[in-house]
Image: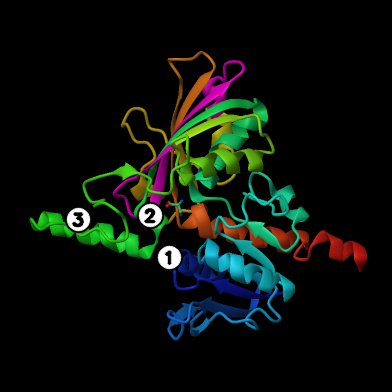
Amino acid sequence: KSYSVAILGATGAVGKELLQLLESRNFPVDNLKLLASARSAGQTLPFKGENLPVEAVSDDAFDNVDIVLASAGGSISKVWAPIAVAAGAVVIDNSSAFRMNPEVPLVVPEVNPQAAANHTGIIANPNCTTILMALAVYPLHQVKPVQRIVAATYQSASGAGAKAMAEVTTQTSAILQGKKPVAEVFPYPLAFNLFPHNSPLNDLGYCEEEMKMVNETRKIFGNQDIRITATCVRVPVLRAHSEAINLEFATPFAVEAAREILSNSPGIKLVENWETNHFPMPIEASGQDDVLVGRIRQDISHPCGLELWLCGDQIRKGAALNAVQIAELLVEKNILKPMASYVSS
Ligand code: 2RA
């Protein structure tokens, strides 16, 4: 069986990666629609040797579509996801619009695939930093429940889109030529600089990006008791996020056991060469499906603490790959339609 698929936000960095992954993973597509804003419509994008047209999204754009992969921002998803669901499609949404909606499963296929079956038309793709952290922490959490997570992120420009990647590149060459860097996408120059994530701050001084890691992780793990704190920082790296993660358990977690578990966990590649000080780096994580994890070590400040470091491609596993894997899960389990529709039929 093959499916009619639509990509909403096809011309963005994640949209283009979705297109590339549908092809490279040979997803069973018999009809593919590329949808974007009227401003972006008219261009073409390559798929399986053809140049497909990008159309402006419209009320009837989702007719006869089985699966929508949406990555066009929360405001666009809020408008079009319900229309797509009403047209009979299942929407896998990469925006934050529906992630904390109790009706909407928030899924990392390697962590909580079972949650996808409860969808009522929309499945949310978690935030990139959450996906990467959940992938590395959950295998350990399954063996010994994590009590507390302290995360520090080093987030690539790609998280703010293709224009942000172009901006940091331009800024870098400007500085190297002795010119003043121009900051438009970001509030400050990112080249040779870094700054706390500039998403809106709450009354406790935490930004939205940090609260996503707290709230989304608890939802994905199905555990509202895990204590989580995060400091999210934008760094001058193009497309891979890095995260320093400190885990606290009720009893000591042996480093060797953690290393063994993570080296056998799906979606993870252990990168640790203590002799050559070779550990995960964004330049090696970029373009890879796997999240690189390494520098697993006992926390010297706490007998039940464990430290680890990871790097993961923000556009790939942090967004597009996770979404395509959710689509693959729905196809494999034959749960494209809400469960209620199976019961009633
Ligand atoms: C960022 N995770 O990196 C957010 C949105 N992709 O800015």
Q: CA distance from mark 2 to mark 3?
A: 15 Å
Residue 181 relative to residue 307: left or right? left
**What's the mark number on residue 172?**
3
Secondary structure beneath disc 1? helix
Q: Amino acid at mark 1?
A: Ala
Rendered-image quadrant of the N terminus: bottom right
**What's the mark number on residue 191?**
none
Front-lying residue, 66 or 214? 214
Rendered-image quadrant of the C terminus: bottom right
Select label 2 or label 3 by which is in front: 3
296 shown above or below 155: above
**Which residue is disc 1 drawn over?**
13
x%, y% of residue 99?
62, 52
Q: CA distance from mark 3 to mark 1?
A: 20 Å
Q: Is residue 26 visible?
A: no
Q: Residue at x 63, y 46 (%)?
A: 110
Secondary structure beneath disc 2? loop
x%, y% of residue 181?
17, 57
Front-lying residue, 162 or 52? 162
